[in-house]
Image (cartoon, helix red, strand yellow):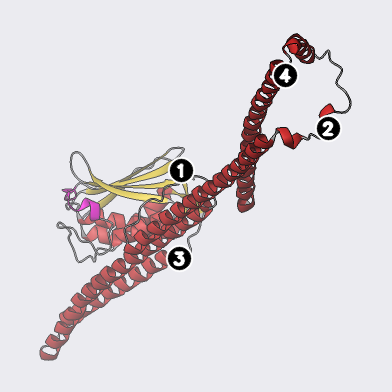
Amino acid sequence: MSGRKNMMILTGLVLSVSVLAVSIATMLLTDYYNHTHMQMLGEICQKVIEKQPKAQQTILEVLKEYQYGQTNVPKENILLAYGYGPSYFGGSAVKYSGFFSAAGFLAGVLLFLITCMLWRQKENMRIKVLTEYLEKVNMGCCGVLLRTGEDDFSKLQDEIYKVVTELQQTRDAAVKAKNNFAENLYNIAHQIKTPITSISLSMQMMRENPSLQHLEQINRQLSRMTHLEEALLLLSRIDAGTLSLKQENVDVFTVLMLAADNLQEIFSRADVSVDILELGEMMIRADMEWTMEAIMNVLKDCMEHTPPGERVHCSYEQNPLYTQIRIWDTGAGFAKEDIPHLFERFYRGREMKGEGIGIGLALSKALIEAQNGTITARNLTNAGACFEIRFYSH
């Protein structure tokens, strides 16, 4: 459709130029004819007057009568009766008439060729721009492909830009996935290496001096490996989108209480308690079990940084946009350089205590974000670290 439209425009342009050229040629030719006839009539009248001076007044009267249309023109030209034709008096006019006609035709053809050349030049320029852009893409240094006008190449340009953008995004995602895979593989190998080394040492020591202490050490390391395996499998299911998460109405206070109850033994050993403010019923759309799992990981992190005899505090609030849960401790807070990396997998801060593998907060972040939520961490003004979890209504 676009090609037909352009062809119609081009044809109309050529016809317009041709008509213009013919009009100008006709105007010039008409003006030339008028001057030629005037000159010829003047010469004839002059010759008549020279031979018959008394006929001057008669000639002038006839010319005036002819000018004002008072003369009865005979039906048959008298010159034809004496054997004279139009070509006898208009020889030069006919010659110039052919010249002007040929000039008008050549002008129309020339304008047509110039139009075609300009049109072809424009197409070549557009092809050159697209070709240079694709060459830059192949060299890996492409930018934005700017639109240069609406023409036959506009749709092609848009499709090329879409394909290139999608390929860039795919390439970036593949590079990122490759880097993440390599990093995760290194971290997993590092995490497995420690318990395997510990188990190997315990086995050697048991051969030399069997004791229950070595057996307990082996059990702890096996439990650690089992926990790592479960966490990695869960993260892989979240990444692949195969983890089934329920969407049901869950009371925030109930989730916090259940999470604290499941950690009661661990908190008791650390001599840390949990303070949960009861602020009434507030509902969120989430999966009870997995949301509780995410909050438990946050509570354990706060517990590890809370001095003995102190408390981990929990509160929550709701507005038309989201429901927010705040969990904070009374410890020394996060190191500034650790805050941007707290939710990265296998990251352990400088002040990290215990034998954690640095995957709990990453798991919490993945579970919360999979349920239309966010989690952030910051230091409080006075002291302590604070986690803010938001579940959005829409």
Q: Mostly what secondary structure, the magenta segment? A: loop
Marked residue nearer the N-terminal end (2 or 4):
4
Q: Nearer the viewer, mark 3 or mark 4?
A: 4
Q: State yes or no: residue 183 in magenta.
A: no
Q: Amino acid at mark 3?
A: Leu
Q: Is residue 105 above or below residue 25?
A: below
Residue range corresponding to the magenta coloring? 331-341
Q: Along the line of sight, which residue is nearer the eye, 11 or 138? A: 11
Q: Is residue 260 left or right of residue 148?
A: left
Q: Amino acid at mark 2?
A: Leu
| Disc 3 from disc 4: Cα separation | 117 Å
Q: Is residue 316 above or below residue 158?
A: above
Marked residue nearer the N-terminal end (3 or 2):
2
The residue under label 3 is: 243
Q: Is residue 321 above or below residue 173?
A: above
Q: Nearer the viewer, mark 1 or mark 3?
A: 3
Marked residue nearer the N-terminal end (3 or 4):
4
Q: Residues within 10 Å of mark 2 (few under 14, many from 20)?
A: few
Q: State the count of labels.
A: 4
Q: Residues within 10 Å of mark 4 (few under 14, many from 20)?
A: some
Q: Along the line of sight, which residue is nearer the eye, 39 or 333? A: 39
Q: Residues within 10 Å of mark 1 (few under 14, many from 20)?
A: few
Q: Nearer the viewer, mark 1 or mark 2?
A: 2
The residue under label 4 is: 48
Q: Along the line of sight, which residue is nearer the eye, 29 or 346? A: 29
Q: Amino acid at mark 1?
A: Glu
Dot 2: element: helix
The residue under label 1 is: 281
